[in-house]
Image: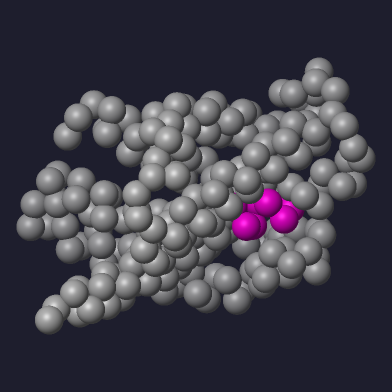
Amino acid sequence: MKPKQKGKIAVDFLMTALLVALMSYPVTGQLAHEWVGAGMLLLFIAHHILNRHWFKTLGKGRYNGLRVLQTAVDVLLLADMLALMFSGIRLSRYVFAFLPGPGSAATARRLHMLASYWGLVLMGLHLGLHWGMMAALLRRRLGGKVDLPLRCAGAAGLYGAYAVWKHQIWLYLSLHSEFLWFDFDEPAVLYVLDHFCMMALFTLLAHTAVSLMRKRQKGAAKP
């Protein structure tokens, strides 16, 4: 695998890990949350520099159902991350406090809440739609042992369905709740694990959708 490809995968992996850390704000606190957010901003810039060819190919080639889905999720994720970072800088009390921010803090807080949870969903979908690249890397690194980590990812996704119900994230996705509820009696590691597994759920759903679409395409191609 070429160094550039390895760099892309490393950046994507780190962005995924940092997003889960950012979703764990009640555990990390404000200062650490802002520094992790600053790290995410740098990785976001690096990600788009490494993948700048994607912007050039948007108007080229044929769009089938899978490419339409992948492009739609990628564009929505880009818009979501921009909203997340803009609102995060506006709300900053430490790292970016020196920057003037337009608009009210209340509006920025609502936008930040909305973009945070949609970011969790869209990042999971993005990973699932591009899972083939990750699976190929695992096969190259682990050989015949690749089934175990893939099954672990599937199990995490299934637990993520329970975590979605437990945390009722649809309330945040629709802004029916503008304040984050946190059980202080719950172990912090479990809170972090729940959010990782929720992302894994959306990864699993997207990967399943891709598999079904490809099988349908193969079936349609047969005479």
Q: Who's the residue at 44% across and 60% down the image?
A: 68
Rendering coords of residue 196 (x, y %) = 48, 57
Q: Who's the residue at 55% across and 70% down the image?
A: 163
Q: Who is closer to the viewer here, 102 or 203?
A: 102
Rendering coords of residue 127 (x, y %) = 40, 54
Q: Main secondary structure of the magenta part?
A: helix
For residue 147, side relative to residue 153 (left or right): left
For residue 84, side relative to residue 152 (left or right): right
Q: Is residue 189 visible?
A: no
Q: Who is closer to the viewer here, 208 or 20?
A: 208
Q: Who's the residue at 51% across and 56% down the image?
A: 73
Q: Who is closer to the viewer here, 36 or 9?
A: 9
Query: Is 218 included in the stretch rendered in magenta?
Result: no
Range covered by the magenta-colored residues: 113-119
Q: Is residue 50 visible?
A: yes
Q: Who's the residue at 78% across and 64% down the image?
A: 175
Whether residue 124 is situated above or below residue 169 in the rendered picture: above
- Quarter of the image containing the C terminus? bottom left
Q: Who is closer to the viewer here, 219 or 111?
A: 219
Whether residue 96 is situated above or below residue 80 in the rendered picture: above
Rendering coords of residue 189 (x, y %) = 52, 54
Whether residue 145 is situated above or below residue 41 in the rendered picture: below
